[in-house]
Amino acid sequence: MTALLPTRKDEAYRYADLDALAPLWPVAVERIVLADGEQRALSIIESGQAPVARELAVVLGKGARLDLRVLNAGFAYARIAVRAELGEEAEFIFGAAQLANGQQVQEIVTEVLHAAPGAISRQTVRSVAGGQATTNYLGKVRVAKGADGTDGEQSVRAMLLDRTAKANAKPELEIFADDVKCAHGCAVGELDAGGLFYMASRGIPPEQAKALMLQAFIAEAFAGAADEEALLAQALERLGEVL
Amino acid sequence: MLNIDNLQATVADKPILKGLSLSINAGEIHVIMGPNGAGKSTLAYTLGGRPGYEVTGGSAMLDGQDLLALDPHERAAAGLFLGFQYPVEIPGVSFVQFLREALNAQRKGRGEEPLSGGEFLKLAREKAALLRLDMDMLKRPVNVGFSGGEKKRAEMVQMGILDPKLAVLDETDSGLDIDALRVVGDGINAIMRRPDKAVLLITHYQRLLDYVKPDFVHVLAGGRIVKTGGPELALQLEEEGYEAVAA
């Protein structure tokens, strides 16, 4: 591979930490191919000290189902990119949580192509950023011509713990079919002050109250996962440091 | 038990409490009534330590402890319970988890051993039954999807579990139908009507007082207590209105 290092002009790298990415470039593509009717659950946990960039290319055959969960909770730049091509009536579940602090940049980039009719994609991304960290989600859902009966969903939320933290979120839809159902919701916010006071009034100290609320927030990304408990346990460990 | 002396507080730099004084002894139930904007909720939030409610003068002591010097969670551990007019929804956190963490944090603050999961559930079941709240509701996320009446019942269950010395209940009776009103009234009596506890009940209406007999009724207007009397004062207010009685 001789591809040049991307620049900020490349939309998918607009918010990336290019300095951290340079030594990892080019990124090898990891292929995940599910045959017709095949079902698989997969969890990716990044929790290390070194920068990481991964590029997944997913192809789902007719009626195949992939449940992919990502916990982005390392201590350096981390980029997980997923391209998924969905065959007829395939189902792609994607749940990701990111936990960043310090100067860290973490990003999830997805491009989901509904290539044939009747496929389902459900993406849930929850990001928590403290300090001067940045979390990104760039997610494109493309519905090809003729892919009628498509059902695509993106739920994207980010929580900023400090005024200096940043979250970029860009859910995108590109639809070339007529009969489709595509929904996306996107919100960036802070922890609910009313909820924090309510908890404090019952005796819960502030750090514990924040952890409880964030735990519930992150859990949305892992609901129903085969590894739900392990993913949550790892996330909570990191959460303690981010707070 | 509670001694408030010349308390002054502002909200967004606007003075709301303007020298409020009030003493409540153990074993007593006091009621504060008053027109809209008198400062009733501000009093509750100021005692609870809500951010944005700034004390500019005076003092509030709970059993000799300077309440105003404590963080909100420390006030709870010191024995204060604040009943909310609008209980807050906390998605994804179950009542059981919320209350167990709250109780054990309070116990830790007081140097007591934490309750085990089993001990806590036993206590929660007992208090839920007392307030006729289905135990299954306590397995749901805090207040999420609860009706107004259920939220207030849940507030009472929380009060029963946390077992405070002093409960400050801010319009706990608002949004309740007659049956729920009776349940809440009975709950206050069952949990708080004890020689070592006290209640400050903030309300607009006399009707809750049919179930909870107060020892003293105060009228709050313009950020001060302007009149104090017995239960008959509430009836008089109901008949004649604040303006006539407090003028």
Image (spheres, helix red, strand yellow):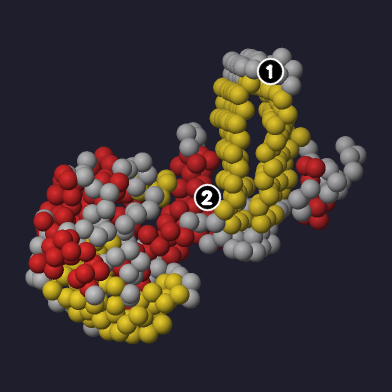
Amino acid carrying label 2: it is Ala
Q: Is residue A146 above or below residue A129?
A: above
From the image, tell me which residue sits under label 2: A235
Q: Which type of secondary structure does the marked residue at label 1 adopt?
A: loop
Q: Quadrant of the N terminus of chain A?
A: top right
Which residue is rendered at x = 16% and y = 44% of the image? B179
Amino acid carrying label 1: it is Asp
B78 or A44: nearer the viewer: B78
Residue B150 at x, y percent in the picture: 27, 45
Q: Which type of secondary structure does the marked residue at label 2 adopt?
A: helix
Residue A20 at x, y percent in the picture: 78, 54
From the image, tell me which residue sits under label 1: A178
Question: Could you give the CA–CA distance between mark 2 and mark 1, rounded to whole angstroms?
Answer: 40 Å
B9 or A15: nearer the viewer: B9
Chain ID at mark 2: A
If you read the primary sequence from the N terminus, does the residue marked by circle 2 or circle 1 appear first?
A: 1
Q: Is residue A96 above or below residue B64?
A: above
